[in-house]
């Protein structure tokens, strides 16, 4: 005999076969449900409609669906339903379309509506699942406003700061040619520091946009171009021959490489050796690339902290470099991990990267 304390009661009617079960589900979902017939007459409304549009279900049943449609859109709705009933051709996305609905107090509510058709007793009915997207619209509007402010700020930084900064650096270099004093050297260092901060702030202002159009990019040739722009002294860069091109936003990928290569030179010493190579998966297929150096590396306890904006161990560092690297990787959908290289230095791994054949790159060195 089974233990009554552990056995579950078995109803005479399976729960999924109970009409009351489905009625309870429909009446308690947060979305609004509205069913109309082929003549646009409302035959059912659930309590969720009250929360979204302010109508009690009983107020709507028996009336036309036009009651919840803004007047300027009623003729369009009527034509669309009539055309569908006659031809079966859909002119909107039934899985989700944004349409305004009319609230009981007269204001419009932005909604997302999914539609389904069903037949009962030989009659055609259409049910709309209605979601209030007011909060999402508000967030999108706020994001647009913030982006406009960032774009304006980036323009000010790019033009109103970088231009006079360039002039100041030029005159400082001319002055050092005539009077190479320690004071002028400190001025030049400070101007370089300001320029580095400005570049990082500009890069950060593009966060959220993350990446634009992606295209085949030759990792090796782009890395060599970036390397040529870095004051690397006795440092060396080598790119493995089997490091294949990848699909990336070239501008953002250039930022990623620039931050990693400068980071290696600044933190691992003037004679650092930097290597870029492919990462193979367990099946032997290429799944990404790495950038590694033979410097002191990054302690495991600090690998999360170094990705935070403003974190730096250098007296004159901005603390944004690796945070920008993480942002660019995330924007591409790549997985980014900091590990220890086999030579003891830092190793930055990027996986989930789409590689392409060498001949897919139509311009530049490969």
Image (cartoon, helix red, strand yellow):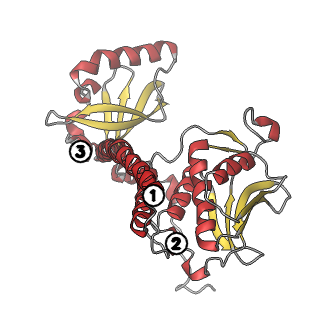
Can you see residue 132? no
Label 3 vs label 2, nearer the camera: 2
Provide residue 248's location: percent of width, then percent of height.
Answer: 64, 44
Q: Residues within 10 Å of mark 2 (few under 14, many from 20)?
A: some
Q: Quadrant of the C terminus?
A: top right
x and y percent of residue 214 in the render? 62, 39
Image spot of residue 133 (x, y percent): 33, 43
Neighbour tally class for label 1: few under 14, some 14-19, many 20 plus, Cα within 10 Å: some
Q: Is residue 252 above or below residue 59?
A: below
Residue where numbered disc 3 is placed: 50
- At a point 70% along the width and 75% down the height, the residue shown is 345
Q: Residue 349 vs residue 127: left or right?
A: right
The residue nearer to you, when weighing 200 against 227, is 227
Can residue 299 be seen in the rendering of this structure? yes
* Disc 3: CA contacts within 10 A as few (<14), some (14-19) or many (>=20): some
Residue bearing the label numbered 1: 176
Residue occupied by mark 2: 306
Pick whichever of labels 1 and 3 is earlier in the sequence. 3
State which mark lies toward you, 1 or 2: 1
Task: Give the secondary structure at mark 2.
Answer: helix
Q: Earlier in the sequence, mark 1 or mark 2?
A: 1
Q: Secondary structure at mark 3?
A: helix
Relative to 139, 274 lies left or right: right
The numbered mark, 3 or 2, whose residue comes first in the sequence reads 3
Q: Nearer the viewer, residue 291 or 172?
A: 172
Q: Nearer the viewer, mark 1 or mark 3?
A: 1
- The quarter of the picture where residue 272 lies is bottom right
* Label 1 with label 3: CB-CB less than 8 Å: no
Q: Is residue 311 above or below residue 323?
A: below
Alpha-carbon span between mark 1 and mark 2: 36 Å
């Amino acid at each position: 005999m089974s233990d009554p304390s552990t056995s579950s009661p078995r109803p005479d009617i399976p729960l999924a076969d109970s009409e009351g079960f489905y009625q309870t589900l429909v009446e308690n979902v947060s979305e609004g449900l509205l069913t109309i017939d082929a003549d646009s007459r409302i035959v059912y409304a659930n309590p969720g409609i009250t929360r979204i549009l302010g109508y009690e279900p009983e107020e709507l049943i028996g009336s036309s669906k036009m009651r919840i449609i803004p007047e300027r859109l009623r003729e369009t709705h009527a034509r669309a339903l009539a055309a569908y009933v006659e031809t079966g051709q859909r002119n909107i996305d039934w899985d989700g379309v944004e349409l305004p609905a009319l609230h009981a107090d007269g204001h419009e509510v932005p909604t997302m509506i999914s539609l389904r058709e069903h037949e009962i007793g030989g009659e055609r009915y259409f049910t709309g699942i209605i979601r209030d997207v007011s909060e999402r619209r508000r967030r999108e509007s706020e994001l647009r406003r913030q982006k406009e402010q960032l774009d304006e700020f980036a323009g000010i930084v790019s033009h109103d700061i970088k231009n006079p900064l360039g002039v100041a650096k030029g005159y400082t270099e001319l002055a050092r040619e005539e009077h190479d004093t320690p004071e002028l050297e400190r001025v030049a260092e400070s101007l370089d520091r300001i320029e580095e901060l400005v570049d990082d702030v500009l890069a950060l202002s593009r966060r959220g946009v993350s990446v634009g159009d992606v295209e085949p990019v030759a990792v090796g040739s782009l890395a060599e171009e970036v390397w040529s722009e870095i004051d690397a002294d006795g440092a060396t860069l080598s790119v493995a021959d089997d490091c294949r091109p990848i699909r990336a936003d070239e501008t953002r990928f250039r930022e990623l490489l620039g931050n990693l290569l400068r980071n290696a030179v600044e933190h691992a010493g003037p004679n650092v050796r930097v290597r870029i190579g492919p990462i193979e998966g367990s099946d032997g297929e290429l799944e990404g690339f790495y950038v590694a150096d033979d410097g002191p590396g990054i302690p495991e306890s600090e690998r999360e902290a170094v990705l935070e904006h403003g974190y730096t161990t250098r007296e004159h560092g901005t603390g944004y470099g690796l945070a920008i690297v993480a942002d660019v990787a995330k924007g591409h959908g790549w997985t980014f991990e900091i590990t220890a290289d086999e030579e003891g230095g830092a190793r930055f791994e990027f996986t989930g990267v789409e590689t392409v054949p060498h001949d897919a790159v139509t311009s530049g060195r490969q």
